[in-house]
Amino acid sequence: MTKPLILINCKTYPEAAGKKALKIAQQIAQVKNTKYRIVIAPSLLTLQEIAGKVKIPIFAQHADPFSFGAHTGSIPIQELKSLGITGTLLNHSERKIPLTILQKIVHLCRKEKIITVVCASSLAEVQKVASLHPDYLAYEPPELIGGNVSVTKAKPEIIATAVRLVRSLSPSTKVLCGAGVQSAADVQKALELGTSGVLIAHAVVKAKNPKRMVERMLE
Ligand code: G3P
């Protein structure tokens, strides 16, 4: 059994921008926990700053369906790989991707052995995303993102339904959930509902002590 995934999404929060990116990644990398797989997704502009400097896996927040080449303004999957980035978030509700493009990205990531965490905002989208067979599918209701009500409290039935749906449509895909996750109880509830982990952003990135906050949430 693989360990549950705890994906810390730094978004483009000022607390993790510029030189602060490496600092927060180093703090989170110091969390001693053997039960979970802790991963950080720094802003795209700070990826290079952090790559190779911390002992936890680093995921990108987005990728484009390209290898190296003439793709101005893009995030080529091969370039992520060459930096040592091992996975990518895709289709976050703050960075939606049309399904046909998403399909190409997931396909290329599979080829390059980059782990895919594809977000879905609704059960209808869960169905579409599951058909792409990503490594992880993350259910995140947009209205709860950035707030203080956890998805595990507000929408437990939908999480359980998403888990069942994905198991039937894409048995190899693991399900995550996110939005408002901020306590150990929220993380435990997500696992009880059948997920393989959670996505967390503001509760950790904006915490006074991000390391302590992660430790508390994983107690
Ligand atoms: O990708 C995770 C994110 O959207 C959840 O945000 O701030 O509600 O934990 P937050």
Image (tube, rainbow, N blue to C red):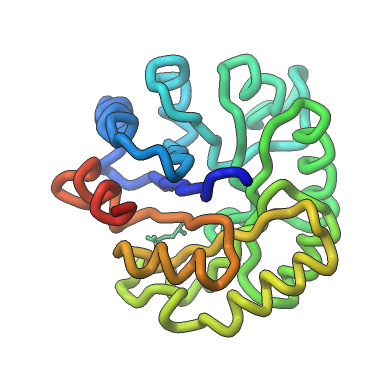
- Numbered-mark total: 0
The quarter in which the C terminus is drawn is: bottom left
202 up-or-down from 107: above or below: below
x%, y% of residue 202?
32, 56
Examine the rendering and report whether any part of residue 142 can be seen.
yes
Residue farthest along the front direction in this orientation: 1
Residue farthest along the left direction in this orientation: 208
149 up-or-down from 201: above or below: below
Residue at coordinates 70% horizontally, 37% vertically from top-left? 64
58 up-or-down from 92: above or below: above
For residue 72, which quarter of the picture? Answer: top right
x%, y% of residue 94?
53, 58
For residue 125, which quarter of the picture? Answer: bottom right
Closer to us: 158 or 59: 158
Residue at coordinates 69% horizontally, 32% vertically from top-left? 114
Q: Is residue 101 left or right of residue 18?
A: right
Closer to us: 85 or 20: 85
Q: Is residue 53 left or right of residue 137?
A: left
x%, y% of residue 195?
58, 63
Residue at coordinates 68% horizontally, 43% vertically from top-left? 116
x%, y% of residue 10?
39, 44
**In what quadrant does ligand 1 lie?**
bottom left
176 up-or-down from 145: above or below: above
Closer to us: 186 or 129: 186
Residue at coordinates 80% horizontally, 48% vertically from top-left? 101
Examine the rendering and report whether any part of residue 17 can be seen.
no
Q: Is residue 30 left or right of residue 169?
A: left
